[in-house]
Image: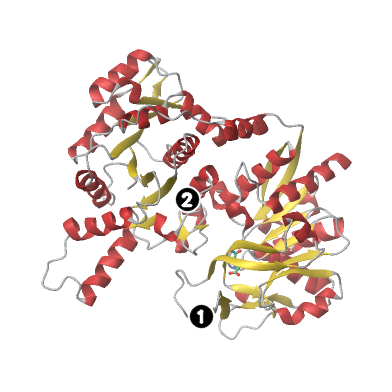
Amino acid sequence: MARYVFITGGVVSSLGKGLASAALGALLQARGFSVRLRKLDPYLNVDPGTMSPFEHGEVFVTDDGAETDLDLGHYERFTGVAARNTDSVSSGRIYSTVLEKERRGDYLGKTIQVIPHVTNEIKDFLSVGADEVDFMLCEIGGTVGDIEGLPFFEAIRQFGQDRPRGETIYMHLTLLPWLTASGELKTKPTQHSVKELRSIGIAPDILVCRSEKMIPQKEREKLALFCNVRPDSVIAAYDLKSIYEAPLAYHREGLDQAVLDAFQISPAPRPVLTRWEDVSDRIFNYEGEVKIAIVGKYTQLEDAYKSIAEALTHGGMANRVKVRIEWVDAELFEHQDPAPFLEGYHAILVPGGFGERGTEGKIRAAEYARTRKIPYLGICLGMQMAVIEAARNLAGLETAGSEEFDHEAGAKRFEPVVYHLKEWVQGNHTIARRVDDDKGGTMRLGAYTATLAEGSKVAEIYGTTTIEERHRHRYEVDIKYREALESKGVIFSGMSPDGRLPEIIEIKDHPWFIGVQFHPELKSKPFEPAPLFRDFVRAAKDVSRLV
Ligand code: GLN
C-alpha cells in the first residue's frame, strides 16, 4: 500500500503547490521510489473542460481521455508518469457521483450528507491504485479556509485516521511576506494558516515556506515552535529562474529528506540526481537564442498555452538554445498583411483553439509561413487553419473554411474542408456523437494511434511510423479533399490506422511546415522533449543562423 503525502496551501493562492508536489515526486523517484500524483479541485465544474482558458489556464488531456487541471501537466513533466482519469477530481464530479448514486437508490433509506457520503466518495477516489506505487502525492486545490474545500480537508483528515499510523503525512505550503518598512520576514500569516488547518484536525508535518529573502535560522525556529513542526521540517522555497531547478533546489533545502524522516524511512536511499543536473545544465548553458511567435487568441494569459510553452523550452534544451516565446494576437491582422507583426521570428506556431474569433489571422499566419518558408508548426486548430489556407490559396477553393465557423443554424458561408466529426473508431469500437450533444467531455479525447508515411519528414522526426498522441477536438480535415490538396503539394503524412482521419500534413518543398491534429506538447518532458518540438526548434535555430 502506498504512503500518502497530502499537499495543502495557505495564506494566498498561486504559491506553486503543483510545482512543489511535482518536484517532490521527482525527488522521491530519484531515491528509487515509484510515485503517482493526484489533484483534488474544490470547484463545482465536473471537469475543467468547459472552463475558459482565460480563467483557468489550459486543459490538460490524459492518455485515457480525461480533461484535467494544468497541474497534471507539471506532474507528468517532472515525473514522466502518465496521468490517468483517476488522478484528477473536482467537487463537481464528487457531488455528481453522489447524486447519481442517490437517484439510483444506492443509499436507499439514508439521509445523504457531506459526512460521510461526500467524504467517503473522496476517500474512494484517493484509494484507487494505492497498491501500485510506493508514494501517492495528493494536492488539494485552493487554500485552507475556502468554503468549497472543506469536504476535501475533512476527507484527508479522516483518511489519515483510517490508515495505519505513520503512513500519511501532511505538507503545507505558505508564504512569508517581506516587509520592506521593517526589513523583516513575517511569520504571522503562516501561523494563522496552520492554526486554521489544525482547527479542522490536520497537523502539518512539513511546512514549505515561499519567500523572496533568505529565511534566517531564528525565523525557522520560531515557525517550528509556533506551528508545531520540527525545525528541519521547515523548508524554504525561494524564487527560481526556471521551474526545472525546483527538484535540485528543494533537495538542497532538505524537502525529500524531511519527507522520508516524517515516514521514518531509515536509512534513506541515496538520491541519484543526474537527470536534474543535466536538465539544469541545459537550461542555463545555451549557445544562442531563437525567437518563436505563438499566434493565438488567449495571448494575455500564458497559462492558456502552458504545455506548448514548456515543450518549446524542452525543444530549446535539446538544441542548446534559449527559446524566446512571443505571444502574437491573431486578431491584429485579420484584415491586413501579417508581415509587420511576424517579421523577425525564426518560426511560427499556431496552437489549438476554439471558435471563429481570430481564425482569419491564423490563416494569414499560415500563408505567411508557407510562402516565406518560415518553419511552421500548426497544432490542432493550427493544422486546420493551414489546410484551409492551402485549400484557398493553392487548390483554388476560395470559400474553404471550417464547419466550426458556420455556427448559426442554416449559415453556409464556407465550403467545409474541416467538418464536424460525428463518428470515429477507437481501438475496435466506434464512437458516435450528435451535433447537439452536451459540450462537456464529448470531443475526440485522449491518445489515438497515427500511422506515418514511410519516408515522410514526420516519420524521420519520430524515428518510427506508428505513434500515439493525445487529441482534443470536435472537427476534422475532410479526407475527400486529399487529392485536390496533394496535387498542390500538401502531403498527408499521418493518418488514423483506418485511413479515414488525417492526423498530420506537411508542405512539400518547404524547410519545415507541419500541421498535426493532436497535441504533441502534452507528452513533452525536459528530459525527453517531444520529437516534433525538438525538431521544430532545430529548424528555428537553422533560420536564426541564416539571418
Ligand atoms: N476547435 C477545433 C476542433 O474542435 C480545434 C480544437 C483544438 O485546437 N484543440 O476541432
The residue pinned by badge 1 equals 433
Camera-side residue of 434 and 189? 434
What sort of colour scheme is used for the picture?
secondary structure
Residue 169's image quarter?
top left
Q: Position of residue 413 (x, y in %)?
A: 68, 80
392 w.r.t. 159: above or below: below
Q: Is residue 454 visible?
A: yes
User: Would you say the residues marked 1 and 2 are in contact, meaning their CB atoms lie under 8 Å apart?
Assistant: no
Q: Residue furthest bottom?
A: 410
Number of residue marks: 2
Task: Give the position of the C terminus as an image quadrant.
Answer: top right
Q: Vertically, is 510 above or below 173? A: below
Q: Circle 2 sits in a helix, a strand or a loop, which is it?
A: helix
x then y, percent, for residue 202: 22, 38
Tell me if residue 353 can be seen: no
Report x, y in % for residue 173. 36, 34
Residue that label 2 marks: 72
Label of residue 536 in the image: none
Residue 134 located left or right of residue 244: left
Residue 454 placement, left or right of 127:
right
- Viewer-nearest of discs 1 and 2: 2
> Residue at the location (40% across, 55% down)?
88
Q: CA distance from mark 1 to mark 2?
A: 27 Å
Q: Amino acid at mark 1?
A: Arg
